Amino acid sequence: MFLKEIQLYDERNTTNFNSESICVTEMFIWELGKKFETQNCEMVFFHCGDFSELRLVREEQDGYNFLVPKKSYDVELPFDQEKYKCSASVNKKQLMTEAVKEGMLYLSKLKGWNQNAINATIEKMYEKQLIHTFRPWKGKRSPNRKAKAYPVVNLDLNAFSVELVVENTKKEILKRTQIAITKPDLHDLSYFMKKLEWVNNDEVVLYTKANKGTFNRVIVSDSNP
């Protein structure tokens, strides 16, 4: 079994911690990859708050569904929410990243998970300055094979965004167009990213999930054949 998702969670819900943490937890899972073996855990909920120690309190969910797999862990993780609330954005990301590191290393020691992979993932996150910008799909080439288009997603504390980027065969950027900015909600962002198609060699569209087949269009350039 492989780990698919982690969440940092504040049950008091007195700040924006739950939504702001998505950019950090999603970055961790992205950098960790899809093949992190756990044997019996698909998801981890880290309950961050006024706890005296790290503690695994549940290893299997009773009321499970497609959002909460049966093989999910609940972990109590000591976390200073007041310090977090008063911190600048970059410091908030650091606090949450260290919480993820502490929680995941605790579980790795307890369950025999790969500690080196966790440490390497955290290191990669810091190398990227905790900025989670990525390409969710492979690029799609234009009919004449002279250009490639792909979406670029950025997840930040207070907003998510998607751009449509077009590059030539030398990987030079021909066009970069912002498609949408949403609140920090993956479902809201995914609305703008149903399917990418080239209309012709100079026009590419990114379809939304609306029933009427709406889309955002990008014209590459009048001179691009």
Image (cartoon, grey):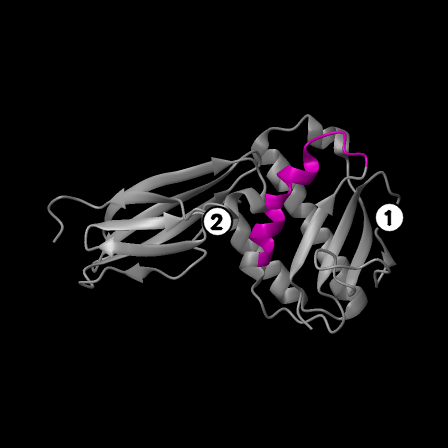
Indicate the amino acid at tag 1: Glu
Q: Nearer the viewer, residue 42 or 113?
A: 42
Query: Which element carries disc 2, helix, strand or loop?
Result: loop
Query: Which residue is found at the position 59% from the left and 51% from the top?
Result: 26
Image: magenta residue range:
12-29
Count residues near mark 1 (Cα–Cα under 10 Å), then give few for <14, some for 14-19, many for 20+.
few
The quadrant holding residue 216 is: top left
Q: Nearer the viewer, residue 222 or 139?
A: 222
Query: Which residue is found at the position 56% from the left and 33% from the top?
Result: 158
In contact (CB < 8 Å): disc 1 and disc 2: no
Residue annotated with mark 2: 209
Q: Is residue 26 above or below residue 182?
A: below
Q: Position of residue 74 (x, y in %)?
A: 81, 55
Mark closer to the observer (1, 2): 2
Query: Which element carries disc 1, helix, strand or loop?
Result: loop
Quarter of the image that includes the N terminus: bottom right
Count residues near mark 2 (Cα–Cα under 10 Å), then give few for <14, some for 14-19, many for 20+.
some
Does residue 188 appear left or right of residue 139 in this picture?
A: right
Q: Nearer the viewer, residue 128 or 12?
A: 12
Residue annotated with mark 1: 53
Whether residue 206 appears in magenta in the rendering, the answer is: no
Whether residue 14 appears in magenta in the rendering, the answer is: yes
